[in-house]
Amino acid sequence: MSVLSPDELEARLRAIGAERYHHHHPFHRLLHTGGCSRGQVQAWALNRWCYQAVIPQKDAALMARCDDVEVRRAWRSRLVDHDGETADDGGIARWLKLTDGLGLDRDMVVSQRQALPAMRFAALAYLDFVRSRPLVEAIGSSLTELFSPAIIGERVAGMLKHYDFVTPETLAYFAERPPRAARDSAFALAYVKRHATTPDAQRGVQDALRFKCDVLWAMLDALHAAYVAPGLVPPGAFVPADHPGAAT
Amino acid sequence: MSVLSPDELEARLRAIGAERYHHHHPFHRLLHTGGCSRGQVQAWALNRWCYQAVIPQKDAALMARCDDVEVRRAWRSRLVDHDGETADDGGIARWLKLTDGLGLDRDMVVSQRQALPAMRFAALAYLDFVRSRPLVEAIGSSLTELFSPAIIGERVAGMLKHYDFVTPETLAYFAERPPRAARDSAFALAYVKRHATTPDAQRGVQDALRFKCDVLWAMLDALHAAYVAPGLVPPGAFVPADHPGAAT
């Protein structure tokens, strides 16, 4: 196996996203095209919280392993974006505005008590990956953000159009994300192009992006299986009021 | 919340198993009653490998955290059972006889390359739990073995009756397990009854058993969603020859 040029590596990474990013998942199509019930949208927001909650932890874990002050300084903006400066600010707070707006009890959401175990396990796997893999792979695993601006645009437009229970305020999280995702993914992409300079490291970065696509895909698989088809909600997990078989 | 007597704690733990152990999962009923295709049985054995592979690691992680020589000595028999004395011996080797017998390539199985990401994440969550939670909870998470002898009896009888591609030799793993599971779970139950003597510790042990039931359930959910209904195999995962839409 020979070394790729930085641009060849970028092309490989973009091809992985084109093939495996979760915009291909049927749950996303359903969510964006108005095919979800209110209960299914609640289940998505409640469960995706498990992932949102872990993002600043994984960013802190990454910085904890990084001895380069410039990388840590750049990466710190991710903590600011998600944790905010006050309790009303930042991505974490904006995600809770989404779950509030969908009528979910905030303590229940934050506790993850009724989340699908598979969502918690996927989020934990991401945290574990960033804690344990080489730094260039940990940074590489963030590169799904190369592909998120397009999906977020579709999501916001589609959800506002199709769901009368969704407002621009409840979707405030997504309004903030595209420029930040573009900035962050440009930094991460430049980092891996500069630092993954051996065949092993280049394969590792590609595998890291595949792994992260697997995390996002597994979360939607779990949502789809529990709340769309076959609709098998695991013991103890959230049962939307409009779920077939929900107590009336 | 008041302290439970040891026998009350045992009754609570048995009630958790009666309610949440994976013998209630539709995939298990399908597997035991002849409802699976050969490809679905292959998918089960291939994916369950992710869990088998992590068991001796979690047992070693538990022993690594334990300063009681008697507990370590008793727990060591689990390592011997799974890792064996030679490459042909032990639970790991017997699981690979199962996947061999089902016609799966051994390197592919061991690599986990075509396993469902959700299976790897669930197995990792179990390992992380045992590494990070208090020792009495780590031991408590093993208590699903209280309930395994019954399910194994059903599984072996049902699979031999219904599947002509399954032989007693391919199921050798399960022949060994019931007496060992009974011995191991009796030890773990006695340990938690003796050491979980505060309301917090008793709640922790119950939550540990619920967590472990969630791990086992999530694995079957992932199998069911990928290979039964809706049959949505994630990118890169094993596609059985008899799966709808498999390349012919």
Image (cartoon, coloured by chain):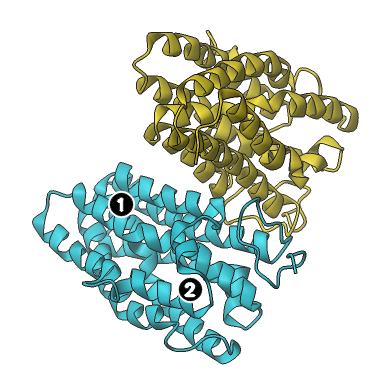
Chain colours: A yellow, B cyan
**Mark 1 residue type:** Ala
Residue A81: quadrant of the picture: top right
> At which x and y percent is residue B106?
45, 68
- Rendered residue at 66%/65% (across/down): B227
- Rendered residue at 20%/68% (across/down): B77
Residue B196 in sight from this viewpoint: no
- Circle 1 packing at 10 Å, graded few (<14), some (14-19), many (20+), is many
Q: Earlier in the sequence, mark 1 or mark 2?
A: 2
Q: Which residue is mark 2?
A: B99
Q: Chain of mark 2?
A: B
Residue B214, above or below A41: below
Q: Which mark is residue B138?
A: 1
> At which x and y percent is residue A29?
81, 41
**Mark 2 residue type:** Thr
Q: Quadrant of the C terminus of chain B?
A: bottom right
Residue A47, above or below B4: above
> At which x and y percent is residue B68?
11, 53
Secondary structure under tag 2 reads: helix
Secondary structure under tag 1 reads: helix
- Do discs 1 and 2 belong to a common subunit? yes
Name the foreground residue: B129 vs A236: B129
Name the foreground residue: B59 vs A14: A14
Residue B84: quadrant of the picture: bottom left
**Residue A162 falls left or right of residue B135:** right
Query: Of tags 1 and 2, which is closer to the observer?
Result: 2
Name the foreground residue: B227 vs B157: B227
- Circle 2 packing at 10 Å, graded few (<14), some (14-19), many (20+), is many
> At which x and y percent is residue B78?
25, 66
Residue B196, above or below B187: above
